[in-house]
Every structure is written in C-alpha cells, then in structure tokens.
Image (cartoon, rainbow, N blue to C red):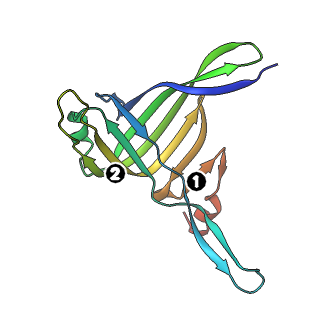
C-alpha cells in the first residue's frame, strides 16, 4: 500500500533564460487571489462576493538576495524576464518506508516593480531584493502541468481544465 507524503523542498535553483543565476536567495512566490465583485439585488438574501472566473489580482514574486550582485541589476531592467525556478521535493512513502524526490518547476514571465539594494553592515548579509509583477506563470509537479495563468492571452488552466476557453471563444480569439 502506498501512502506518499510530500515533506519539504530540499533545494532549488533560479534560472534566467536558461542560465543559472548567481547568488544565494530565497523566493516568495505569487499569491493567486481571484478578482471579485459584489452581487446583490432581487432574489439574493444579502450580498455575495463572487470571483471573476480566470481573472486574478496583481501577482507579485520577490527574490530576496543575501548579497547585492550583478543579477540584482540585470533583473532591474524594465522588461519582461523569463525566470524558471526548479526545485526538488522530498516525498516519504509510509507504505514502503522509502524516500524519493519529485521535481517541481515554476516558469514565470515577470516585469520588475522594485529593486532594493539592501544595506551595508560589516559581517552581515545585504538583504537586497527584486520584486516583480507576474504576467505569466506555469507550474509543473513531477513533470505534470498543474497550473498555467497567462493574463495577456486569456489562459487559466488548473489541473487540465481551461477556465477561460469559453471567454476566448466569446471574444473571437
């Protein structure tokens, strides 16, 4: 009997256009917050906050650098950057008692919003950061596509279901 439990991200690397970025960092991934609107009126006992299907609020991604480096300035260029975050997830199978690794890949197209150069303090990290607006995101887990959101091309695919297909058809796209 298999009882697999994903335990933790063992490590990850960040790539810019297929080139491994230099520097030591951690990444805060975007939050998926559906755009919503209130619906009220006849036939509704009150008010309901409803999502606008396939539409998301601003999606921010932040890379926190340990020290200021050349990648910090490269990523400050006012243009869309193609970033890939590749990780290894440790999975424990309680049925067999064995560990395995599952690949995770997150692809984003992101435009810089803010670049913090950090601080200067002897013997300490500089805590610089790069913050981006994410226009496109695609998530793979164990080689399987789990999520794709492309705001400019009306794409919202979650677990293989395309929630904006009818919208694209209605718009003649």
Q: Is residue 22 left or right of residue 170?
A: left
Relative vertical location of residue 28 with respect to residue 34 in this rendering, above or below: above
On residue 156, the disc is 1
Relative vertical location of residue 158 with respect to residue 144 in this rendering, above or below: below
User: At 42% across and 35% down in the image, what residue appears?
Assistant: 84
Residue 111 location, x and y as percent? 34, 51
User: At 64% across and 27% down in the image, what residue appears?
Assistant: 6
Residue nearest the observer in this picture, 114 or 123:
123
Q: Is residue 80 left or right of residue 138?
A: left
Q: Quadrant of the N terminus?
A: top right
User: In terms of image quadrants, where is residue 74?
Assistant: top left
Relative vertical location of residue 165 with respect to residue 48 in this rendering, above or below: above
Q: CA distance from mark 2 to mark 1?
A: 20 Å
Q: Secondary structure at mark 1?
A: strand
Q: Give the residue pinned by disc 2.
A: 111
Residue 148 location, x and y as percent? 55, 47
Residue nearest the observer in this picture, 156 or 25:
25
User: At 20% across and 26% down in the image, what residue appears?
Assistant: 123
| Foreground: disc 2 or disc 1 | 2
Residue 89 location, x and y as percent? 56, 25
Disc 1 residue crowd, few under 14, some 14–19, many 20+, Cα 10 Å: many
């Amino acid at each position: 009997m298999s009882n697999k439990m994903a335990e933790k991200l063992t490590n990850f690397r960040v790539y810019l256009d297929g080139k491994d970025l230099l520097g030591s960092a951690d990444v805060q991934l975007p939050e998926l917050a559906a755009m919503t609107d209130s619906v009220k009126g006849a036939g509704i006992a009150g008010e309901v906050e409803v999502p606008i299907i396939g539409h998301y609020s601003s999606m921010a991604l932040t890379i926190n650098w340990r020290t200021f480096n050349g990648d910090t300035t490269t990523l400050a260029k006012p243009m869309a950057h193609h970033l890939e975050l590749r990780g290894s997830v440790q999975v424990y199978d309680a049925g067999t008692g064995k560990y395995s690794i599952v690949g995770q890949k997150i692809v984003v197209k992101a435009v810089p919003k803010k670049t913090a150069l950090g601080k200067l303090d002897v013997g300490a990290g500089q805590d610089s950061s790069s913050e981006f607006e994410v226009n496109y995101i695609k998530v793979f887990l164990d080689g399987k596509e789990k999520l794709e959101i492309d705001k400019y091309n009306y794409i919202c695919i979650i677990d293989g279901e395309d929630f904006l297909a009818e919208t694209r058809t209605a718009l003649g796209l």
